[in-house]
């Protein structure tokens, strides 16, 4: 269980060294992306002007306040509360994000499934678990909303955040087929019979 | 008692924001209880971060979670209260929209097919408004619940049959907890509706999921069932955020209703660890805020 401080963007080699149960803290840049953003990018053929190569995306739709473009808020948006959402709904976008845009790190809560695990091992990527529902704390790791694209989808725009010390986050799926979720889920399924017996359920 | 609808609108604005920022004391107590008994290192670290987040939200006057949820207002009206029911509903909608615009809050509400967001947290039949009546004379209470989607997306209904008995109910609850895994931001309150019609059963599961921790089902049979399920649910080891450990659920809550001789419905609705609610109570003395 090692800890890594990563300046974004990262290389394939840097991502491949990460193993489940390691922890990671990110610096500099993070992109925010969500259901509608990816539905429009991958189902409706829209493109982003951002270069996501080697970067991390977090499954999010933040609370922001429009304040107008200033030096402090170059996007015109001030962050209010930024956290994460359930990743499972966005499972089918992991591979295209990696293949078409070169994304290396996906951050979210609740985990992803087999297709994403395969994409992580084929292409070199990881899933970092952030704790859902702890957005007040996570907001303190965001310095600024630098830029925004596809903003007609607001709040599900594509957000570019400037971050400082974003983490520690837990490596929950790695590029070597490891997944904490698969391990926990199969152990939980194994306990099902015992729990039902304790409830007096006749099998 | 006559109700001033301007005050109601103001309260409904205030309630949405309060609910998003301050966790009720029973939930904080629930966190302390789980934290003291957690044996898994990852689980313990996650609970610690969640507890820290509650303090950061209070210190920075920020929202606990980014998900502003689907707004729900539960109104209870006492027997001496004089109020225009339609205007009351309009005041609630206005207060909800004002909170969204004025704070501002992320509007998480869209039309179901066009996906258009009005940026008011309102839309057709939303906010959800439930109205009930109580025998207490001079009281109007409004409970506000921002229901997060991570937990709401983990909702299920099974129209089991009488021959499957209570075993079908217990098995269904266990399987729903497994199916939800980490998606509903555990530790959760597992809300279980038993009986009624299909829609009533689902409604009861929501009532159960949003009941304060420590409260008990008024039906002794429901109370027995929730105690049994609460005692074993954490043995599944799903854990906080689905990453393992003993903190899958704060509790299992059950609500019951009479049902048809040929029916045995059971519904499950999850409430996440951001188990937010706020309450305003109007009496002849004025308006008071609580949970
Ligand atoms: S499930 Fe609850 S805690 Fe998790 S992100 Fe949604 S509202 Fe927040």
Image (cartoon, coloured by chain):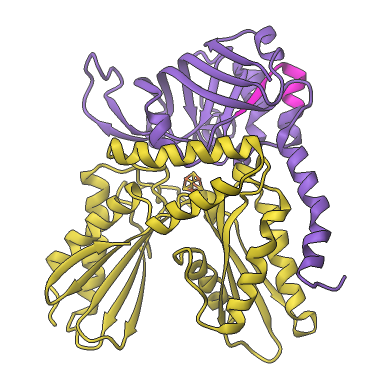
Chain colours: A purple, B yellow
Q: Position of residue A180 (x, y in %)?
A: 72, 34
Query: Which image quadrant is residue A73 in?
Result: top left
Front residue of A202/B40: it is B40
Q: Indicate left or right for B61 with A115 as reference.
A: left
Q: Residue at x 17, y 84 (%)?
A: B82
Most distant residue in the front direction: B36
| Vertical order, B79 against B256 (above or below) | below
Front residue of B198/B49: it is B49
| Vertical order, B262 against B54 (above or below) | below
Q: Is residue A121 magenta?
A: yes
Front residue of B291/A114: it is B291
Q: Which residues are magenta?
A: A118-128
Q: Position of residue B279 (x, y in %)?
A: 30, 64
Q: Indicate left or right for B193 with A199 as reference.
A: left
Q: Position of residue B206 (x, y in %)?
A: 50, 67
Front residue of B227/A189: it is B227
Query: Which image quadrant is residue A203 in?
Result: bottom right
- Residue B115 shows in this picture: yes
Q: Residue at x 38, y 48 (%)?
A: B68
Q: Position of residue A106 (x, y in %)?
A: 59, 26
Q: Is residue B1 magenta?
A: no
């Amino acid at each position: 269980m090692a800890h890594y401080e990563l300046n974004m963007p990262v290389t394939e080699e840097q991502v491949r060294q990460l193993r489940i149960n390691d922890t990671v803290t990110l610096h500099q840049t993070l992109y925010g992306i969500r259901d509608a953003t990816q539905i429009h990018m991958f189902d409706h053929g829209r493109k982003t002007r951002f270069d996501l190569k080697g970067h991390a995306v977090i499954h999010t739709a933040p609370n922001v306040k429009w304040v107008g473009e200033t030096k402090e808020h170059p996007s015109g948006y001030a962050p209010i509360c930024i956290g994460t959402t359930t990743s499972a709904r966005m499972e089918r976008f992991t591979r295209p994000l990696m293949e078409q845009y070169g994304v290396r790190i996906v951050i979210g809560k609740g985990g992803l499934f087999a297709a994403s695990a395969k994409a992580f091992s084929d292409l070199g990527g990881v899933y970092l678990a952030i704790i859902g529902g702890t957005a007040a704390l996570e907001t303190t790791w965001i310095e600024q909303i630098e830029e925004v694209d596809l903003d007609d989808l607001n709040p599900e725009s594509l957000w570019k955040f400037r971050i400082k010390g974003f983490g520690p986050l837990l490596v929950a799926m790695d590029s070597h087929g490891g997944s904490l979720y698969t391990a926990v889920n199969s152990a939980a399924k194994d306990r099902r019979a015992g729990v039902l017996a304790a409830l007096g359920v006749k099998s | 008692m006559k109700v001033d609808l301007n005050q109601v609108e103001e309260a409904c604005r205030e309630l949405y924001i309060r609910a998003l920022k301050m966790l009720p004391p029973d939930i904080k107590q629930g966190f302390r209880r789980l934290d003291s008994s957690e044996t898994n290192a990852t689980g313990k670290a996650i609970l610690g971060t969640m507890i820290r987040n509650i303090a950061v939200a209070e210190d920075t006057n920020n929202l606990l979670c980014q998900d502003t949820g689907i707004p729900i207002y539960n109104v209870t009206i006492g027997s001496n209260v004089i109020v225009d029911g339609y205007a009351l509903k309009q005041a609630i909608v206005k207060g909800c929209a004002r909170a969204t615009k004025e704070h501002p809050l992320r509007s998480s509400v869209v039309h179901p097919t066009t996906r258009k967001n009005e940026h008011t947290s309102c839309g057709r039949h939303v906010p959800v408004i439930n109205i009930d009546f109580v025998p207490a004379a001079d009281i109007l209470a409004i409970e506000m619940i921002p229901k997060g989607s991570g937990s709401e997306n983990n909702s299920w209904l099974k129209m089991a049959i009488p021959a499957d008995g209570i075993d079908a109910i217990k098995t269904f609850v266990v399987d729903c907890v497994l199916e939800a895994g980490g998606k509903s931001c555990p530790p959760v309150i597992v809300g279980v509706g038993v009986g009624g019609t299909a829609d009533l059963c689902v409604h009861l599961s929501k009532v159960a999921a949003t009941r304060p921790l420590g409260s008990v089902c008024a039906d002794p049979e429901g109370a027995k069932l929730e105690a049994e399920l609460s005692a074993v649910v954490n043995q599944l080891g799903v854990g906080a955020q689905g990453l393992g450990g003993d903190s899958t659920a704060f509790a299992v809550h059950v609500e019951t209703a009479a049902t048809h001789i040929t029916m045995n419905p059971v519904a499950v609705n999850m409430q996440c660890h951001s188990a937010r609610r706020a309450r305003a109570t109007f009496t002849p003395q004025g308006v008071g805020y609580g949970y």
